[in-house]
C-alpha cells in the first residue's frame, strides 16, 4: 500500500471521529439570531450559498472596501463594519469569510469563539463591538455542508468528491517529478482529509508563477498572462525577465481591473508598450459570451448563473500568439476551461505552464492530469505559496 492509499484508508477508518455532523454545525450556528459574513468577496459568496442550502440566511455582509459598502451582494446588504454594529441587534455571530493560512486551530466551537477569528481582522471587529467572531474554516470538517461546491471556497474541500476520485489522485501523485512536489501534494491531501493543523512546505510569494527553478529569463520570451488583474504579473515578468522580450498577452475580464492594467501599460516605454497585447476578455474553452461576477478587484469569477457583467470568452489558441514560452493562469476556477482553449498552442509550443490549482476541490488532481493528457513529455511540479490554500502546478 502506497502513501496515498494509506491516507485514504486511514481517513475511511477514522471518518466518524473526524467529521462534524451537519446537525452539530446547525446547532452551533443556531445559537445566534443574527449571522453576519465578513468579506463580500468570492469566499463570502460561496459561504452565503452554503448556508442558504441548510436554511440559514445571513443578515448582512461586512466589508472594509468603501466601493462595496452600501451595495448588495446576492441580495444581502454590505455594511461598513464599525457603523453596522448599531444596526445589528440581538445575539450576533460574525463568520469571517477570508481564506486563512490555517495557522490557528481550535478543537471546539466555543474555543474558536474565544480565539476570535482571523488574526488579520479580529482586532478591528472586537474594537467595533462584535463579541462573537469565528472563521468559516472552523466548519471544514462538516463535510456535508461543503458537498457539491457551487462557487470558490478553497479552504473547505468537497471530501466525498475526493473519495470518489482516489485513483485519479493517486495517479497525479505518481506523475509529479520531484520529491518536494510529492511532499507538498501528500501534505495538502493529509491536511484536507486527516489533520488540518499540518503545515505544508511553502515558498516565498514573491516568486509565485516565476519560481526560479522553473522560469528562466530569455530575450525571446512570449508571455500569456491569464488573469492579468492590474498588471501585477506583468510587473514581475519585467522585473525577472527584463525589458527584452518578444511579446506579452494579457487577458483580464473585470472592467475595473482592465482599466488599471491599461493605465499601467501606458506608463511603459514605447519599445515595451508596442509588444503588449491586452484584452478585456476571459480565457475560455471556446469563443462565447460569458457572465462575470465582477468584484472590481481580486477574485472576479465567471458565473453564468449569478454573474451580472457581460464579458467575451476567448480561446488562447486564437490570440495569434506564436512561439509562446510561458503561460500563467490564476482565473478563479476557470483554469480547466482555459487550458482546453489553449490545447493547440500547448501541443505546438510546449511553453512553461504555471497554473493555479486550488480554486475548486477537483483542480488539485484534474489540472495536472489535463496537462499530462495534452503533452506526456511535461515534467509536473507543485509548489505552495500559502500553506494548503494557494498552490501552483508547474509544467516544464
Image (cartoon, rainbow, N blue to C red):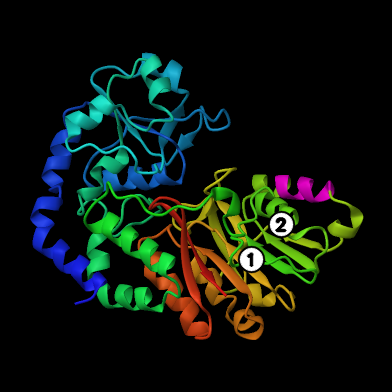
Placement of the N terminus among the 4 image quadrants: bottom left
Picture layout, residue 381 above or below residue 44:
below
For this rendering, which residue is in front, 155 or 301? 155
Picture layout, residue 162 above or below residue 113:
below
SS assignment at label 1: loop
In the drawing, what numbered circle is on residue 215?
A: 1
The magenta stretch spans which residues? 260-267
Q: Position of residue 253 (x, y in %)?
A: 62, 55
SS assignment at label 2: helix
Query: Looking at the rendering, which quadrant does residue 256 occupy?
Result: top right
Neighbourhood count class around disc 1 (C-alpha, 10 Å): few under 14, some 14–19, many 20 upward: many
Magenta region includes residue 265: yes
For this rendering, which residue is in front, 184 or 277? 184
Q: Residue furthest front?
A: 179
Judge left or right: residue 357 versus residue 188: right
For this rendering, which residue is in front, 51 or 268? 268
Picture layout, residue 389 above or below residue 353:
above
For image coordinates 46% across by 58% down, the residue present is 391
Judge left or right: residue 55 versus residue 344: left
Picture layout, residue 81 above or below residue 281:
above
- For marks 1 and 2 on the same chain, the one whose residue lies earlier in the sequence: 1
Dominant secondary structure, magenta: helix
Q: Position of residue 285 (x, y in %)?
A: 55, 73
Placement of the C terminus among the 4 image quadrants: bottom right
Neighbourhood count class around disc 2 (C-alpha, 10 Å): few under 14, some 14–19, many 20 upward: some
Whether residue 193 is visible here, answered yes or no, is yes
Q: Give the Cα separation between the discs numbered 1 and 2.
A: 9 Å
Judge left or right: residue 330 versus residue 260: left
Q: Do callouts 1 and 2 mark residues in contact (Cβ within 8 Å)? A: yes
Give the residue at mark 2.
240
Amino acid at each position: 500500500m502506497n502513501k496515498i492509499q494509506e491516507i485514504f484508508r486511514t481517513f475511511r477508518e477514522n471518518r466518524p471521529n473526524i467529521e462534524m455532523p451537519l446537525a452539530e454545525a446547525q446547532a452551533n450556528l443556531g445559537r445566534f439570531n443574527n449571522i453576519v459574513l465578513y468579506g463580500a468577496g468570492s469566499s463570502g459568496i460561496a459561504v452565503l450559498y452554503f448556508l442558504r442550502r441548510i436554511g440559514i440566511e445571513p443578515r448582512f455582509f461586512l466589508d472594509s472596501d468603501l466601493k462595496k459598502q452600501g451595495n448588495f451582494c446576492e441580495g444581502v446588504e454590505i455594511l461598513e463594519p464599525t457603523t453596522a454594529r448599531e444596526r445589528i441587534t440581538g445575539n450576533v455571530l460574525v463568520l469571517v469569510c477570508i481564506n486563512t493560512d490555517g495557522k490557528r486551530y481550535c478543537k471546539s466551537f466555543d474555543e474558536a469563539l474565544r480565539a476570535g477569528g482571523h488574526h488579520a481582522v479580529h482586532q478591528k471587529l472586537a474594537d467595533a463591538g462584535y463579541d462573537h467572531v469565528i472563521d468559516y474554516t472552523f466548519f471544514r470538517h462538516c463535510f456535508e455542508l461543503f458537498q457539491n461546491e457551487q462557487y470558490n471556497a478553497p479552504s473547505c474541500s468537497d471530501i466525498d468528491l475526493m473519495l470518489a476520485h482516489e485513483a485519479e489522485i493517486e495517479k497525479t501523485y505518481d506523475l509529479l517529478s520531484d520529491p518536494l512536489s510529492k511532499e507538498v501534494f501528500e501534505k495538502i491531501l493529509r491536511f484536507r482529509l486527516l489533520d488540518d493543523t499540518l503545515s505544508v512546505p511553502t515558498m516565498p510569494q514573491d516568486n509565485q508563477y516565476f519560481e526560479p527553478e522553473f522560469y528562466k529569463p530569455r530575450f525571446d520570451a512570449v508571455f500569456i498572462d491569464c488573469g492579468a488583474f492590474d498588471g501585477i504579473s506583468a510587473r514581475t515578468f519585467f522585473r525577472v525577465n527584463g525589458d527584452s522580450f518578444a511579446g506579452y498577452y494579457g487577458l483580464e475580464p473585470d472592467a475595473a481591473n482592465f482599466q488599471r492594467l491599461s493605465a499601467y501599460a501606458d506608463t511603459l516605454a514605447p519599445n515595451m508598450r508596442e509588444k503588449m497585447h491586452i484584452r478585456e476578455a476571459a480565457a475560455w474553452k471556446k469563443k462565447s459570451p460569458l457572465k462575470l461576477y465582477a468584484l472590481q478587484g481580486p477574485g472576479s469569477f465567471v458565473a453564468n448563473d449569478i454573474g451580472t457583467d457581460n464579458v467575451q470568452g476567448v480561446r488562447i489558441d486564437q490570440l495569434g500568439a506564436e512561439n509562446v514560452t510561458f503561460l500563467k493562469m490564476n482565473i478563479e476556477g476557470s483554469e480547466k476551461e482555459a487550458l482546453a482553449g489553449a490545447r493547440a498552442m500547448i501541443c505546438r509550443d510546449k511553453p512553461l505552464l504555471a497554473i493555479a490549482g486550488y480554486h475548486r476541490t477537483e483542480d488539485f488532481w484534474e489540472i495536472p492530469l489535463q496537462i499530462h493528457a495534452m503533452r506526456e513529455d511535461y515534467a509536473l511540479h507543485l509548489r505552495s505559496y500559502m500553506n494548503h490554500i494557494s498552490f501552483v502546478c508547474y509544467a516544464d
